[in-house]
Amino acid sequence: MSSAANRPISPHLSVYRWQYTMALSILHRFTGVVLSAGSVALIACLLALAMGPAEFYGWESIFRSPLVRLAALGWTWCLCYHFANGIRHLVWDTGRGFGLKEARLSGWFVFLFSLAATGAYWWWGPFEGRLL
Amino acid sequence: MSLRSPLGRAAGLGSAGHGVAHWWAQRVTAVALIPLTPWFLLHLAWLPSLSYEDLLYCFQGLGDATLLTAFVLTLLYHSELGARAVLEDYVEGGLRVACLILSKLAHIGLGLAGLLAIVRIVTQV
């Protein structure tokens, strides 16, 4: 096993020229981690709802605070991005879409979709465009 | 000490014997989340307000409660698989084991809390 431990580790990120598809790739992980952390807030909301009106309205000031609103906006974008890019990954799993042009095009599509969907949801969704 | 060659031992096992199960579960939960996530977001978006009564009412129907349960549990399962992959990649040694145990227990805890919360939401008058 000692020889295995000294083997060079792939990928050698430092030898590659920077490309935006790399940023899209690491963003999938980043948004995934944010969504995992956000699931704690999601469960907290369900618990607040389960505990009855008194507790719910007691917690409501926290839910409606600007910082939490901003976090919710960020979480919404992470969800939209991870959702669209996840579908991109599922398509890749079928062996399709690996061409340079296709991969770049789908990357742009995913990124623009995430911005548009987040904006639309924030504007027309339950928050009605209110950030603060 | 095995008499089999390293290749013979590794052949057909995948990364560590269970790699395929992890990969497959990640895909199955991902596919399940494709309809469940928009359902959850749009369900909230169509509410007249985010008041206690409206939120409670919109999840109390048996169909809605079932979908909410499916969404929460699938999301947490998918989250646990993803968190495990990230921890295995970036954390090493004893800390990795500690983080993996903590992540798994946290996800199970969140799942139980979410499940019991939904039961109370459904039974609330």
Image: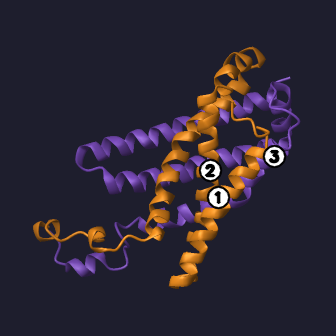
Chain colours: A orange, B purple
Q: CA distance from mark 1 to mark 3?
A: 15 Å
* Local crowd size for mark 3, using a 10 Å CA cut-off: few (<14), some (14–19), many (≥20): few
Q: Say which chain tag 1 marks.
A: A
Instruction: Name the residue that disc number 3 marks.
Output: A124
Query: What amino acid is labelled 3 in the image?
Result: Trp
Q: Quadrant of residue A54?
A: top right
Q: Say which chain tag 2 marks.
A: A
Q: In this picture, is A106 found above or below A64?
A: below
Q: Quadrant of residue B54?
A: top right
Q: Residue at x 69, y 35 (%)?
A: A131
Q: Secondary structure at mark 2?
A: helix
Instruction: Name the residue that disc number 1 marks.
Output: A114
Q: In this picture, is B28 found above or below A118?
A: below
Which dot marks residue B121? Answer: none
Q: Are marks 1 and 3 on the same chain?
A: yes
Looking at the picture, tell me which residue is in the foreground, B17 or B37. Answer: B37
Query: What amino acid is labelled 1 in the image?
Result: Ser
Q: Is residue A111 visible?
A: yes
Query: What amino acid is labelled 2 in the image?
Result: Trp
